[in-house]
Image: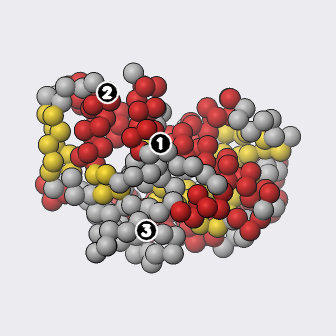
Amino acid sequence: MESILVTGANGQLGSELRAIASRDVCGGRYGFVFTDAAELDITDGAAVGAFVAAERPRWIINAAAYTAVDRAEEEPDQAERLNAEAVRNLVSAAESVGAGFVHISTDYVFDGSIPADRHALTETEPTQPRSVYGATKLRGEGYALAYPKSLVVRTAWLYSTYGNNFVKTMLRLGSERRELGVVADQWGTPTYAADLAETLLRMIEGCDERAERFGLYHYTNEGCTTWCEFAREIMRLGNRNCTVHAIATADYPSAATRPAWSLLSKRKIMETFGIAVPTWQHSLNRCIQNLL
């Protein structure tokens, strides 16, 4: 049986991939090898090379990343090692055994300004990150896309039943408080990590069928909202009696610049792989039902 090696297996996306593997959604075509920092230090090129040489996976999914956006401003070297140099190590190892490579990137590679026509950002939009996190993720993209057998998938506003995320934080705060403020001038689309995980496996199967499908894609759920409206929907679906007030980004200062516009176009991934993308409200309801 051919295998898929997953890095960052204890994170939100890695945990969702682990859940999928337990359901055998690939029809037994692939086995999975799950690793996190304890099993494999992806910043150690020699260790990565030796591990991949021993396992000889058909695919590598890199679900590991330095995602502490604000802390990255103070720890740029650490962010660089995990978001860029580790990707270079994994790509080199994938190339050595002829494996396909899947890398997860972010909306932070764009400058985050709101377009005059408010269009969804395509894969061909110019990149101009305004944070250390975004810059390191963009360099990681470059290492991945230099390898012809790579899929790079940009996503945004990721949440899950696993780990720490906005949805779980809002549910907790909604039980503790009667009201809170959430920014209402940053636009984008939430992404249920379970949907992303299933999409990645669909993409892998699609590239095994037709190699010309490798490349750069965007994936989030469908629709457009603000963090404030996202929070209000979480409270409604979670039956929390908490009023969410709209505040401005300027009222909630942070070390790293947050994108005002993160709406990503899914047209390419839908047309290339025939993937139907659920609305963010539908997927959020599924997640919350799993959490309650």
Q: Which mark is residue 35?
A: none
Q: Quadrant of the N terminus?
A: top right
- Amino acid residing under circle 1: Tyr
Q: Is residue 112 left or right of residue 145?
A: left
Q: Residue at x 61, y 52 (%)?
A: 275
Q: Residue at x 71, y 46 (%)?
A: 5
Above or below: residue 271 compared with residue 125? above
Q: Circle 1 — which element?
A: strand
Q: Is residue 71 visible?
A: no
Q: Nearer the viewer, residue 212 or 130?
A: 212
- Amino acid residing under circle 2: Gly
Query: Alpha-carbon neighbours of circle 1 within 10 Å: few (<14), some, or many (≥20)?
Result: many
Where is residue 107 drawn, in percent x and y?
Answer: 43, 62
Above or below: residue 281 compared with residue 49? above
What residue did someone put label 2 on?
Answer: 238
Q: Circle 3 — which element?
A: loop
Which numbered disc flags the more N-terminal residue, 1 or 2? 1
The residue sitting at the top extreme is: 292
Q: Which mark is residue 192?
A: 1
Q: Circle 2 — which element?
A: loop
CB under 8 Å between discs 2 and 3: no
What residue did someone put label 3 on?
Answer: 121
Which numbered disc flags the more N-terminal residue, 3 or 1? 3
Above or below: residue 176 compared with residue 151? above
Query: Alpha-carbon neighbours of circle 2 within 10 Å: few (<14), some, or many (≥20)?
Result: some
